[in-house]
């Protein structure tokens, strides 16, 4: 049943206080937002029957307690819409492995963020041990874990290893973690994960055109979106700048190595931005990763005509994006969990 002017809403509202109706309306709007975040296109979704039924049911439910009438709306699917969907997100970085439980409808952490140091050297064996340890502390009951990994990831397999042990190259990361923990893993590039979260819940929400997210950390990670669609594994920290890989010149590690203040580093990063501009003409550049927390210290020193903003979700974006990518409605339809390709 579609929601329309002739539904009981108007009739019932006469018997109930305005305040009550307004608060129910707010809930309906919230539901609407939830639905609009429900697919991967990042565009406003068309009203669906399920959504209309759900909104109508919210109104009906509010009066259910006072009027002994059966709810006239079908809402069999609404529990999936209403319940928070909790997925464990893990963000593996060169220096830390962060994790938290995420409400993938809201894009928020619902548990404390845990951080364990990335073992050095970060070999498959050593990192897997940390993942197992982390899972034992979290007591996660869900079936799939979303995980961001600092390498090119195709079909769950690592194709590169710039800031981690070279032993990862060719390793099926999804299979390795799944076997060790007994949970299914959905693994994607860490910057792609952060980008997904920012596009869905942060600064990129609703943005068309070309959006690039750059994570500033041990390396420079990138996520490139065109009209909301992700072009995976772009590795925009790996083009050459001043004769070296850009991330060796303009990452936070490079800043620390060369003992630069954030202001001095901003001059280098501006050069990096001008290369991005020359190659991609981005409409929006979002800065994420640990370095984005220092925005106040460097943004006045950036010299760029690009529209550059700090990430809304900061360093949590990687956890949220990885979890969102592993949400149940995505993988339940297929036997295999979603993978990075
Ligand atoms: C890696 C990328 C990664 C980035 C941030 C780079 O060194 O090559 O895959 O996204 O670091 O961790």
Image (cartoon, grey):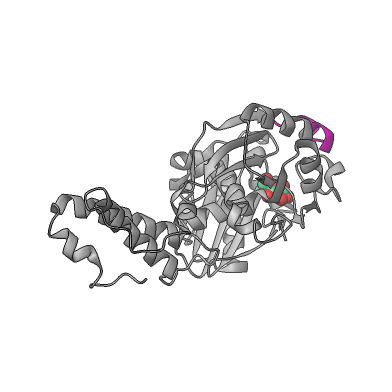
Q: Residue at x 77, y 43 (%)?
A: 178
Above/below status of 252 relative to 12:
above
Q: Residue at x 74, y 49 (%)?
A: 151
Above/below status of 140 relative to 21:
above
Residue 152 as seen in the image, left or right of residue 321: right
Q: Position of residue 117 (x, y in %)?
A: 68, 28
Q: Nearer the viewer, residue 314 or 279?
A: 314
Assign the magenta stretch its main secondary structure: loop
- The answer to whether any part of residue 303 appears in the image is no
The quadrant of the rendering that contains the C terminus is bottom right
Q: Position of residue 4 (x, y in %)?
A: 28, 72
Q: Nearer the viewer, residue 289 or 202?
A: 202
Q: Is residue 53 magenta?
A: no
The quadrant of the rendering that contains the N terminus is bottom left
Q: Nearer the viewer, residue 249 or 79?
A: 79
Q: Is residue 120 magenta?
A: yes
Residue 49 as seen in the image, left or right of residue 216: left
| Quadrant assignment, res 223 | bottom right
How many tags in the picture? 0
Q: Residue at x 21, y 54 (%)?
A: 22
Q: Nearer the viewer, residue 130 or 123?
A: 130
Q: Position of residue 277 (x, y in %)?
A: 57, 64
| Quadrant assignment, res 55 | bottom left
Residue 119 as seen in the image, left or right of residue 62: right
Q: Position of residue 191 (x, y in %)?
A: 63, 51
Residue bounds of the magenta highlight: 117-126
Above/below status of 91 relative to 192:
above
Residue 211 as seen in the image, left or right of residue 35: right
| Quadrant assignment, res 195 | bottom right
- The answer to whether any part of residue 321 appears in the image is yes
């Amino acid at each position: 049943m579609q929601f329309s002017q002739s539904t009981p809403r108007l009739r019932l509202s006469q018997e109930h206080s305005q305040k009550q109706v307004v608060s129910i309306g707010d809930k309906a709007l919230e539901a609407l937002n939830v639905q609009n975040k429900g697919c991967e296109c990042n565009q406003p979704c068309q009203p669906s029957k399920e959504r209309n039924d759900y909104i109508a049911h919210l109104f009906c439910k509010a009066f259910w307690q006072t009027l002994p009438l059966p709810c006239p709306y079908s809402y069999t699917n609404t529990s999936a819409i209403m319940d928070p969907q909790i997925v464990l997100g893990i963000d593996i970085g060169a220096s830390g492995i962060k994790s938290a439980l995420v409400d993938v409808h809201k894009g928020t952490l619902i548990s404390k963020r845990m951080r364990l140091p990335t073992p050095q050297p970060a070999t498959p064996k050593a990192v897997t041990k940390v993942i197992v340890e982390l899972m034992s502390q979290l007591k996660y009951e869900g079936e799939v874990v979303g995980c961001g990994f600092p390498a090119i990831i195709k079909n769950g397999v690592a194709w590169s290893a710039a800031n981690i042990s070279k032993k990862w190259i060719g390793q099926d990361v999804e299979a390795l973690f799944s076997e060790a923990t007994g949970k299914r893993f959905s693994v994607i590039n860490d910057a792609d994960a952060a980008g997904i979260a920012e596009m869905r819940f942060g600064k990129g929400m609703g943005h068309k055109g070309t959006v690039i997210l750059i994570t500033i950390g041990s390396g420079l990670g990138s996520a490139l979106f065109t009209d909301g669609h992700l072009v995976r594994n772009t590795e925009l920290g790996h083009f050459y700048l001043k004769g070296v890989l850009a991330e060796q010149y303009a990452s936070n590690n490079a800043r620390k190595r060369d003992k630069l203040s954030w202001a001095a580093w901003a001059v280098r990063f501006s050069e990096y931005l001008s290369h991005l501009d020359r190659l991609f003409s981005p409409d929006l550049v979002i800065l994420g990763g640990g370095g984005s927390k220092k925005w106040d210290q460097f943004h006045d020193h950036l010299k760029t005509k690009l529209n550059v903003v700090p990430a809304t979700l900061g360093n949590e974006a990687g956890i949220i994006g990885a979890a969102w990518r592993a949400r149940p409605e995505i993988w339940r339809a297929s036997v295999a969990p979603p993978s990075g390709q």
